[in-house]
Amino acid sequence: MRLRASLAAPALCALVLAPFALSPAAQAEPGGCLKYGAAGAVGGHLVKHGVLGAMGGCATGMYKRHEYRKEAREKAALYDKEHPGAKGSYVEKATAYDVEHSTQPGKTAPEATQGGDTSGKS
């Protein structure tokens, strides 16, 4: 009886984790309803409004993801102008645009450094 219990736990773990191991790699995108909704639910729970917090968090996450994808499509269009006929998804093109132009995700133009200010004061 003890042998069955000791074999059942690893088999159950393997069965539960198999879909995650076999699924394609996930893209790293900010936001999302689940991520922000969970955070909103926790915050809402602290003030006795968990469902309202989850709904607000979900809406915020969907908006953040929409803005990220919109910016990625804009960067892909800029990349297409510079490289006509380039193949790949808009995410790949946006990443290539970021690499070529030293931009950070979330910004279309590279950050300007302030030249001549060596005093260290802001």
Image: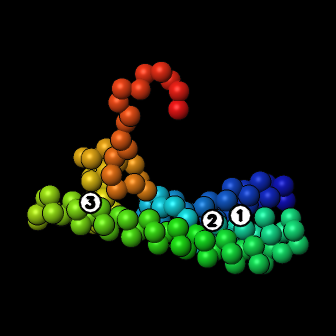
Q: CA distance from mark 3 to mark 1?
A: 31 Å
Looking at the image, can residue 88 be seen? no
Q: Are marks 1 and 2 in contact (CB under 8 Å)?
A: yes
Q: Quadrant of the N terminus?
A: bottom right
Q: Amino acid at mark 1?
A: Ala
Which label sits on residue 93? Answer: 3
Q: Would residue 110 appear left or right of 21 to someone viewing this image?
A: left
Identify the residue at horizontal 77%, vertical 54% (top origin). Answer: 6
Asked where in the image residue 61 lies, by quadrant, the reply is bottom right
Identify the residue at horizontal 72%, vertical 74% (top origin). Answer: 54
Above or below 61: residue 100: above
Identify the residue at horizontal 45%, vertical 69% (top origin). Answer: 67
Q: Would residue 43 appear left or right of 17 to someone viewing this image?
A: right
Residue 16 lies, in percent from the top left, at 64, 65
Q: CA distance from mark 1 to mark 2?
A: 7 Å
Above or below 37: residue 5: above
SS at badge 1: helix
Q: Say which label, 2 or 3, has the lower sequence index.
A: 2
- Please give the residue where the numbered disc 1 appears in the rendered image: 39
Q: Amino acid at mark 3?
A: Lys
SS at badge 3: helix
From the viewer's side, name the closer residue of 25 and 84: 84
Asked where in the image residue 72 lies, by quadrant, the reply is bottom left
Q: Say which label, 3 or 1, has the lower sequence index.
A: 1
Residue 68 lies, in percent from the top left, at 44, 65
From the viewer's side, name the closer residue of 87 and 105: 105
Identify the residue at horizontal 36%, vertical 41% (top origin). Answer: 112
Q: Amino acid at mark 2?
A: Lys
Which label sits on residue 35? Answer: 2
From the viewer's side, name the closer residue of 13 and 87: 87
Q: Would residue 8 appear left or right of 16 to someone viewing this image?
A: right
